[in-house]
Amino acid sequence: SSSSSSSGCARVLQAPLCLATSRRWMRVRAQPARGREKIYSIDNPVTAKNWPPVDQLGDPITPKRCRDIMHQLNVQEMDRMRKLRPFIMPKFDAGDLVEVRYEMSRSQQTFAVFQGFCTEVRNKYLNSGFVLKNTYDGVGVEQLIPRYSPRVLGVRVVHALPQRPLKLDPRPPTRNHRYMYQYYVRGKYGKGKRLLWRWPTPQRPGIMSLEPRIRRELGNIRRRYMMQRAEAKLPPYIFPGPYHITRRQTREIKAERYRRMLIYAWDERQQREAKKRRLAEKHAWGTYKIDKEPKSSALSDLPSYHPLAGNLPK
C-alpha cells in the first residue's frame, strides 16, 4: 500500500511538469534543418545555388576565351621554337629555289638535304610551313616542311625571284566600256547598291566619269537657285531633276548602255574579222608578190638645176 501510494504521488507531480515543458516548446519557433548544407553535390539545391564560390570564380569558358587561350599558347610555342632554332629563317616566297637541311634520326645522327622550288607558303601560326617541289629521275616529289619543327637544321635560299615593282597607282587604268567591258561593266547591274569602283577616280577618265560630273554640276546649280529663292523670301522650290540623272538605273539608261555595248561588240567583231582576213590574205598558199624595182628613182627625179642632173653616176 505504501509503494502504490508513492507511485501515485509521483504521477501527480510529473503531470504539471510535462504540461509546462510542452507549453514552452510550443512557444519556440521551428528551426529549419541545416543538414543539407554539408552535402556538396549538384543534385542538392541548397549548395548548388551558391556554387562555385564568388571569390573562386574566374572568367567563364566561352568560345572566344577558348580561342584566345589557343592563340596565346600558339604564340608562346612559336616564340619558344624560334629561340631554339639553330639558324635564322630567311624570307622567301613562292617560286624561289630553297634548300632545306633536316634531321632524319637523332639517335643515329643522320640528316638529309632537300632542294626544290617553293610552290606554296602556309602561314597558320604553329602549323606554318612551305611546300618544296623537285623532280628526281623524272618523278615529281613534293615535301611539306614545317616552319617550327625542331628537326629542321637549316634553310637556305639558293635563288630568289626578282621582287615585283610596287603598284604605285592602284586605280583602274580606265572606265571606258569599249576597251574594259569585261572588267568594269559585265556583272555590275542588278546587284543592289554596291561599290562599283574601288577608288574615286581612274587614271584616264572614260564614259562613266561624265555622269557624276553632270550630277555634281546640277547639284551646284540647284543649291544656288535655292539660296536665291531664300534671299527673295520665296517658298522653297522642290526641284525634281532630270529623270535620267537623278535616277541612275532607269530603263532608258540600261537600254542606252546595252545599245552601246552591242555597238562596241559589233565594232570589235568587225575589227577581228578584218584582221583575220588580212592574215588569210598574207598567208595564202601559192600566192606570191614580186617586188619590182620602181620606174622612177630619187636620182632620175632630180630637178634640171641639180649639179648631178646631167652626169649621173653609172
Image (tube, rainbow, N blue to C red):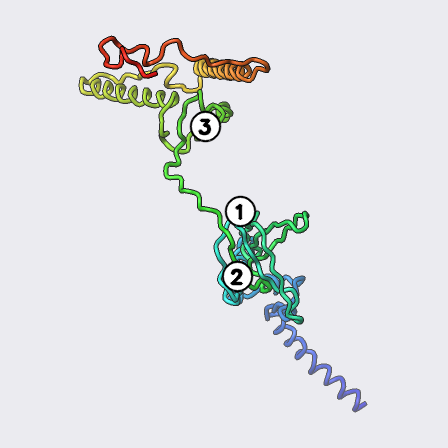
**What percent of the width, then of the height, locates residue 23?**
63, 72
Location of mark 3 (residue): 193
Location of mark 1 (residue): 95
> Which residue is depicted at the point 57% across and 54% down?
129
Quarter holding the C terminus?
Answer: top left
- Looking at the image, residue 307 sits to the left or right of residue 257; the answer is left
> Which residue is depicted at the point 58% across and 57% down?
146
Q: Look at the image and tell me whether residue 255 can be seen.
A: no
Q: Residues within 10 Å of mark 2 (few under 14, many from 20)?
A: some
CB of mark 3 within 8 Å of CB of mark 2? no
Kind of residue indicated by mark 2:
Met
Distance in Å between CA atoms under marks 1 and 2: 25 Å
Q: Secondary structure at mark 3?
A: loop
| Image quadrant in which you'd find residue 38 | bottom right
**What percent of the width, then of the height, locates residue 251?**
46, 14
First in sequence: mark 3 or mark 2? 2
**What percent of the width, then of the height, locates residue 289?**
51, 13
- The residue at the far right in this view is 1
Q: Secondary structure at mark 1?
A: loop
> Which residue is depicted at the point 50% across and 49% down?
93
Kind of residue indicated by mark 3:
Lys
- Foreground mark, 1 or 3? 1
**What percent of the width, then of the height, locates residue 25?**
63, 73
Q: Nearer the viewer, residue 38 or 56?
A: 56
First in sequence: mark 1 or mark 3? 1
Distance in Å between CA atoms under marks 1 and 3: 40 Å
- Foreground mark, 3 or 2? 2
Location of mark 2 (residue): 78
Q: Secondary structure at mark 2?
A: helix
